[in-house]
Image (cartoon, rainbow, N blue to C red):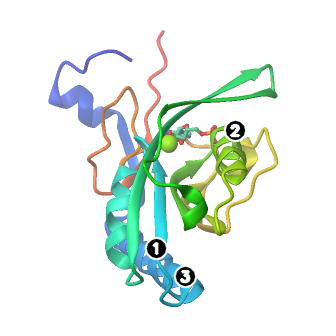
Amino acid sequence: MGIIKSMEEFNSNIKRVIISQEEIAEAVKKAGKYIDDLYDGNPILLVSILKGAYVFMADVSRAVTVPSEIGFMCAKSYYSGTVSTGAVKITMDLDQDVSKYHVVIIEDIIDTGRTLNDVVNLLKTRNPISLQVVTLLDKPSRRKVDFKADLSLFTIPDYFVIGYGLDCGEYYRNLPYIAEYNEVKAD
Ligand code: IMP
Ligand code: MG
C-alpha cells in the first residue's frame, strides 16, 4: 500500500467497525481500575512501545489515579525463521532507571508476541520492582512465541485491524474506533 490518493480510497479500506468508541472507553476505565487496584497508591512507570500504543497510552495514563510517570520506547525484534535471535534493537530507549519502578507496559496489540516478549525480557534484565503487561487487543491465534499479557481487554480473530493508534501503511491511526481493514486483492 502506497500513498492514498483520494478520500474515497481512504474510506473504502475501512471494512467495518469491530470495537466502538464506547466499548474502548469502557475498556480504558477497566484498565485504569486494574492498575489503581494493583498498585494501591504506589508510584508507577507506564511504558509504551511506539507508535501503535500512543492513543491507548494517552487514555490509560488519564484513567489511572496512582502517581505515574510515562516513558516511551521504539523497538525492533530480529528473528531467524520463527526463532528469536534474542536481539531486540532499541531505537529509542527509556530515560528512567527501571530498577526504581513498578513498570506497566501499555500495548496496543499482541500478534505473534515477538516484540513484547523481547522487550519484557530486556526490561527484566534491568530489574524493575515489578512488571505488568496490559494490552488493548490480543490475537492469540497468531502467536509464534509463548506470551501472555496480565490484562488483555479484547481478544480478536485473525483480522488486520486499524484505528485507535493502529495503522496500515501509517494511515488510520487517528480513527477513534477499531475497524477491520479491507484487504483489496489485486486482480
Ligand atoms: P508482534 O507480532 O506481537 O510482535 O506485534 C508487533 C506489532 O505488529 C504490533 O505492536 C503492531 O504494531 C503490529 N500489528 C500486529 N497486528 C496488527 C494489526 O492487526 N493491525 C495493525 N498493526 C498490527
Ligand atoms: Mg505496536
Q: Could you say which disc has been placed on residue 60 in the image?
A: none
The residue at 25%/26% (across/down) is 9
| Residue named by callout 1 | 27
Percent x, y of residue 67 = 39, 79
| Residue named by callout 2 | 114
What secondary structure is found at the residue carrying circle 2? helix
User: In the displayed structure, would residue 67 be above or below residue 164?
Assistant: below
Circle 1 crowding by C-alpha within 10 Å: few under 14, some 14–19, many from 20? some
The residue at 28%/49% (across/down) is 175
Percent x, y of residue 115 = 63, 39
Please report whichever mark, 2 or 3, sits nearer to the chain's N-terminal start: 3
Is residue 61 in view from this perspective? yes
Name the foreground residue: 124 vs 139. 124
Circle 3 crowding by C-alpha within 10 Å: few under 14, some 14–19, many from 20? some
What secondary structure is found at the residue carrying circle 3? helix
| Residue named by callout 3 | 34
User: In the displayed structure, would residue 10 be above or below residue 70?
Assistant: above
Which quadrant of the view contains residue 153?
bottom right
Q: Give the amino acid at mark 3.
A: Tyr
Please report whichever mark, 1 or 2, sits nearer to the chain's N-terminal start: 1
Percent x, y of residue 66 = 42, 83
The residue at 51%/84% (across/down) is 42
Percent x, y of residue 7 = 16, 30
- The image quadrant where one finds the N terminus is top left
